[in-house]
Image (cartoon, rainbow, N blue to C red):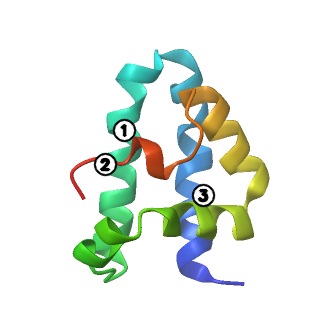
Amino acid sequence: PNPTAAELCSQMEGQLQSWRTYTPSMSKPGLNLLVGEWAARNGIDMLALARDRDRVDAIASAQCPEVRSEALEALQIPTLASALVGF
């Protein structure tokens, strides 16, 4: 198990109810904030993450496919990477 990946999944799971409650346009900035804070806390190079946004999908797919799937549905997006901006 990857503790960094587990943390991302746990944080996303904690936001699912909120993401379901609000419109996707209101919730997508929350995903960006969550990923940005997670990356900063874990020493992840933000520039490298910006060049490889799909890495967030790969991590979530491997660690918590159900949470990732629920997040995609709640945010009405095809991939997590598609909603990440400003990285």
Residue that appears at 31% across and 48% down: 33
Q: Position of residue 36 (x, y in %)?
A: 30, 59
**Residue positioned 72% across, 43% down in the render:** 69
Specify whether 57 is left or right of 68: left
Crowding at mark 2 (Cα within 10 Å: few <14, some 14-19, many 20+):
few
The mark found on residue 30 in the picture is 1
Measured Cα–Cα span from mark 3 to mark 1: 14 Å
Whole-percent x and y of residue 24? 46, 22
Residue found at x 60% / y 58%: 10
Q: Position of residue 73 (x, y in %)?
A: 66, 30
Disc 3 versus disc 1: nearer the observer: 1
Mark 3 / mark 1, whichever is N-terminal: 3
Tell me the residue that label 2 is attached to.
33
Residue type at numbered disc 1? Gly
Residues at circles 1 and 2 in contact by the CB criterion of under 8 Å: yes
What residue is drawn where x is 57% and y is 26%? 76
In front: 1, or 48? 48
Quadrant the N terminus occupies: bottom right
The relative height of residue 50 versus residue 17 in the rendered view (above or below) is below
Can you name the residue that lies furthest to the right here? Answer: 66
Q: Is disc 3 placed on a helix, strand or loop?
A: helix
Q: What residue sits right under mark 3 in the picture?
A: 10
Q: Position of residue 68 (x, y in %)?
A: 67, 49
Quadrant of residue 77 within the rendered picture: top right
Q: Amino acid at mark 3?
A: Ser
Q: CA distance from mark 3 to mark 2?
A: 15 Å
Decide which of tag 3 and tag 2 comes sooner along the chain: 3
Q: Is residue 2 left or right of residue 62?
A: left
Amino acid, disc 2: Leu
Residue 60 in the image: above or below residue 84: below
Q: Residues within 10 Å of mark 3 (few under 14, many from 20)?
A: few
Q: Is residue 1 left or right of residue 45?
A: right
